[in-house]
Image (tube, grey):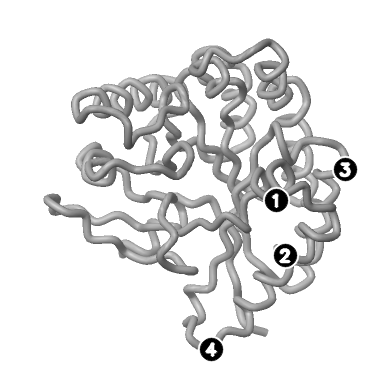
């Protein structure tokens, strides 16, 4: 059977975006579901299947919920950067963006050590973002949509390369569940179909078949939705999928 790797990733935003946009208490509470219930369910599911994962964390979230960052890190999951207050990076001035990255990186590294990866909030990059994070010593990004396999990205105006883990809207729980109100079976079949197709694609070399799934604790953490992820993991394991933290897989690409 053809080998396939899976990166289960989680954007731990909590209520950061709602706070930044000064939204109403109900909208804020929706983000807080990630903290009150969603994250715990995800960590329990990952422990059930002995899977190590990558959590993209906003700096503000880490400051407000340090005990939850400790929970993630102590379970040997990876912490990666996701902006400070879930900013639109493409709307920031160059110096403002540098401050966001440096401040977030400092917060996270004081808690868990070296940060290796980044995902842009809303998957919106400025023309400077990848150069900035490369110069900061990051080894990978997960924000672009130009491929369906990881690849080495040559960063403009930088001697360093990044590994890019491409993303897609149909592999994002928020888009399917919240925006399009898909049923559990529909979401499962979409994700399963992509997994199966990657296994069969002849233009993907054996060690480059990677499914990257983007989930949010405030979304996938709801009771009926976490069951979808449980079902998907069980299916992928039956096909001998190997699960990776992104930093570990990225290191292999840079060898």
In front: 200, or 121? 121
SS type, badge 2: helix
> Is tag 3's residue or tag 1's residue first in the polypeptide sequence?
1
Badge 1 is on which residue?
A: 176
The structure residue drawn at horizontal position 32% and vertical position 20%, both measured from the top left corner, is 103
**Do the residues bearing badges 2 and 3 touch, measured as CB atoms within 8 Å?**
no
SS type, badge 1: helix
Q: Quadrant of residue 125?
A: top left
> In the figure, 136 relative to 52: above or below?
above
SS type, badge 4: loop
Locate the N terminus by quadrant: bottom right
Q: Residue 14: where, in percent of width, then height?
A: 61, 24
Crowd tier of the residue under label 2, counting other residues whose Cα lies within 10 Å: few below 14, some 14–19, many 20 or above: few
Give the label, 3 or 1, closer to the camera: 1
In front: 39, or 67? 39
Badge 2 is on which residue?
A: 190
Badge 4 is on which residue?
A: 202
Calculate the distance from the C-alpha at mark 3 to the C-alpha at mark 4.
35 Å
SS type, badge 3: helix
The structure residue drawn at horizontal position 62% and vertical position 82%, both measured from the top left corner, is 2
> In the figure, 220 relative to 69: above or below?
below
Give the label, 4 or 1, closer to the camera: 1
**Do the residues bearing badges 2 and 1 touch, measured as CB atoms within 8 Å?**
yes
> Is tag 4's residue or tag 1's residue first in the polypeptide sequence?
1
User: Which numbered tag is attached to residue 224?
Assistant: 3
Crowd tier of the residue under label 3, counting other residues whose Cα lies within 10 Å: few below 14, some 14–19, many 20 or above: few
């Amino acid at each position: 059977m053809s080998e396939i790797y899976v990166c289960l990733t989680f954007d731990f935003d909590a209520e950061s975006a709602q706070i930044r946009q000064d939204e109403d208490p109900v909208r804020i509470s929706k983000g807080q579901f990630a903290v009150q219930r969603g994250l715990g369910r995800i960590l329990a599911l990952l422990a059930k299947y002995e899977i190590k994962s990558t959590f993209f964390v906003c700096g503000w979230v880490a400051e407000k919920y340090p005990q939850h960052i400790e929970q993630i890190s102590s379970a040997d999951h990876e912490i990666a950067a996701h902006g400070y207050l879930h900013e639109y990076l493409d709307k920031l001035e160059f110096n403002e963006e540098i401050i966001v990255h440096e401040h977030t990186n400092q917060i996270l590294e004081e808690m868990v050590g070296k940060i290796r990866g980044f995902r842009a909030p809303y998957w919106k990059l400025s023309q400077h973002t990848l150069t900035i994070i490369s110069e900061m010593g990051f080894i990978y990004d997960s924000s672009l949509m130009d491929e369906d396999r990881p690849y080495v990205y040559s960063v403009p105006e930088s001697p360093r390369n990044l590994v890019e883990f491409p993303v897609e809207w149909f592999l994002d729980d928020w888009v399917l569940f919240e925006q399009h109100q898909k049923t559990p079976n529909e979401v499962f079949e979409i994700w399963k179909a992509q997994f199966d197709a990657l296994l069969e694609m002849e233009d993907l070399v054996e060690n480059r078949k990677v499914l990257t799934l983007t989930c949010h604790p405030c979304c996938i953490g709801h009771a009926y939705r976490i069951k979808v992820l449980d079902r998907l993991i069980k299916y992928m394991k039956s096909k001998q999928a190997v699960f990776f933290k992104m930093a570990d897989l990225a290191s292999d690409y840079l060898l």
